[in-house]
Image (spheres, grey):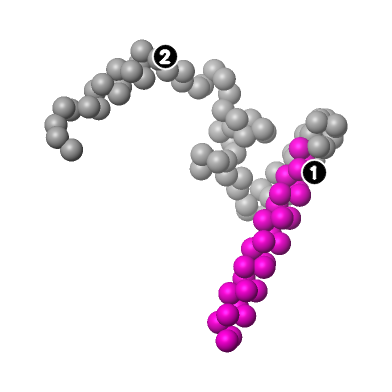
Amino acid sequence: MDVDKRIESAAAQAVRQRNYRRARERALTRLAHAHPEEYQRLREEELERDQAEGKTWISIRGRASGSHNTAGRTPLASTKVRSNQAISNAAKESYVGGEA
């Protein structure tokens, strides 16, 4: 019985946390579109505060935030664009022709 209560409590907490994150992301998106300068200033303040506390920002790709701009995107000049031919060649090279 105790285990069931703990599982229910943990599940409810996970739902609350997920809902909070979703609401926060929606609010930040609205702020970024309505007031881009204010949003940028708040992001910089948050970054400085986190760095002072020894926290690092990690992107989706798992890199530290210093390797990306503030939007979390890789600068266009450093991205590699592969042509359809290169993708096709890579697919052909991976096929060895053996039986599966």
- Report the residue at 54% width, 18% height from top: 77
- Report the residue at 57% width, 20% height from top: 76
Question: Which image quarter: residue 69?
Answer: top right
Q: Secondary structure at mark 1?
A: helix
Residue identifier under label 2: 83
> Which quadrant does the N terminus fall into?
bottom right
* In the image, residue 32 above or below residue 14: above
Local crowd size for mark 1, using a 10 Å CA cut-off: few (<14), some (14–19), many (≥20):
few
Q: Main secondary structure of the magenta part?
A: helix
Q: Whole-percent x and y of residue 51?
A: 66, 48
Question: Is residue 57 within the magenta segment?
Answer: no
Residue 6 in view, yes or no? yes
> Which quadrant does the C terminus fall into?
top left
Q: Nearer the viewer, residue 64 or 73?
A: 73
For residue 99, the mark is none
Q: Whole-percent x and y of residue 87?
A: 36, 19
Residues at circles 1 and 2 in contact by the CB criterion of under 8 Å: no
* In the image, residue 79 above or below residue 7: above
The extreme bottom residue here reads: 1
Q: Relative to residue 94, is residue 71 drawn left or right?
A: right
Q: Whole-percent x and y of residue 39?
A: 80, 36
Residue identifier under label 1: 27
- Amino acid type of disc 1? Ala
Residue 48 in view, yes or no? no
Q: Secondary structure at mark 2?
A: loop
Question: Is residue 7 within the magenta segment?
Answer: yes
Number of on-image labels: 2
Q: Which residues are magenta?
A: 1-29
